[in-house]
Image (cartoon, rainbow, N blue to C red):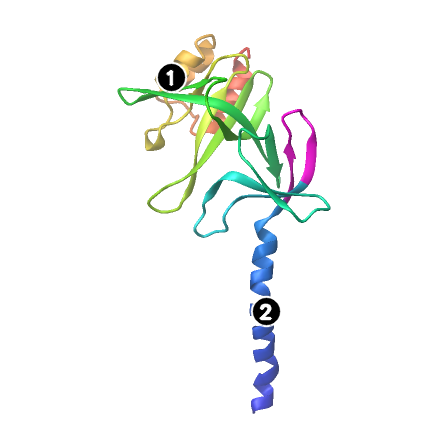
Amino acid sequence: MIELFKKPVLLVVFLCSLNPLVAQKKSFNKGYIIEKGGDTIGGLIKDRSPEPFVNLYNKIRFKREGRTRTRKYGPDDIAGYGYEDQHFVTMPVREENAFFKFRYYTDANAPRVFLKRIKQSGGLIYFEQLFVHDDNDYLDFIPFFYRPGRSDLVRVTQGIFGFRKKRLTAYFYDCPALITEINNPNSNIRTVDELYRFCTSHCKL
């Protein structure tokens, strides 16, 4: 009877011993960094701690291909990085808050931040700024639209309150079709992705 259970028990012990190795391997992803000069360097990337308690790193960890040394890079050190079809760029962003109204500007004198580039088409870029809720370690994001050449970005939504219609109306003042659509109570646009597609197909960007 003991022999029947010996091999399964050994197998379980063996698999459990592999868990730390598997977790360690998965904590890094094959990706790249983009240096300030524009050169792309391949390697292994880690920008957050493993789930379930996620912590976004202020500085990403990077191992260059063929090397074992891990280096750390903040937004001021590189132009961007990416892995697993996720692409991040660095931008100097200044936040202004007046009477609980937030505005966001690109400012060369402001600290640079990592922004996840979701989509880019012509004159409009859809970014997400990732963050972790303090109370529950939940990974969330703030969606932004950015028209290259302008000095400001627009935050698309305001939490559970939906689209920031006034700010979007001001940002896309030159697109009457969008202004009409987002202020239409019967609009079928519900998501940021749907709004982005509408902008790129109905606005001159």
Q: Of label 1 and label 2, which has the lower sequence position?
A: 2
Q: Secondary structure at mark 2?
A: helix
Mark 1 vs mark 2: in front: 2
Q: Amino acid at mark 1?
A: Arg
Q: Amino acid at mark 2?
A: Leu
Residue range of the region highlighted in magenta in the rendering: 30-42
- Report x, y in % for residue 6: 59, 84
Residue 183 appearing in the image: no
Binning the other alpha carbons within 10 Å of mark 2 as few (below 14), some (14 to 19) or many (20 upward) gives few
Instruction: Tell me: 74 left or right of 30.
Output: left
Q: Nearer the viewer, residue 75 or 166?
A: 75
| Numbered mark located on residue 121 in the image | none
Residue named by callout 1: 167
* Residue at the far left in the pictured view: 99
- Report x, y in % for residue 148: 55, 15
Q: Is residue 12 above or below residue 192?
A: below
Residue named by callout 2: 15
Residues under labels 1 and 2: Cα distance?
A: 54 Å
- Report x, y in % for residue 90: 54, 27
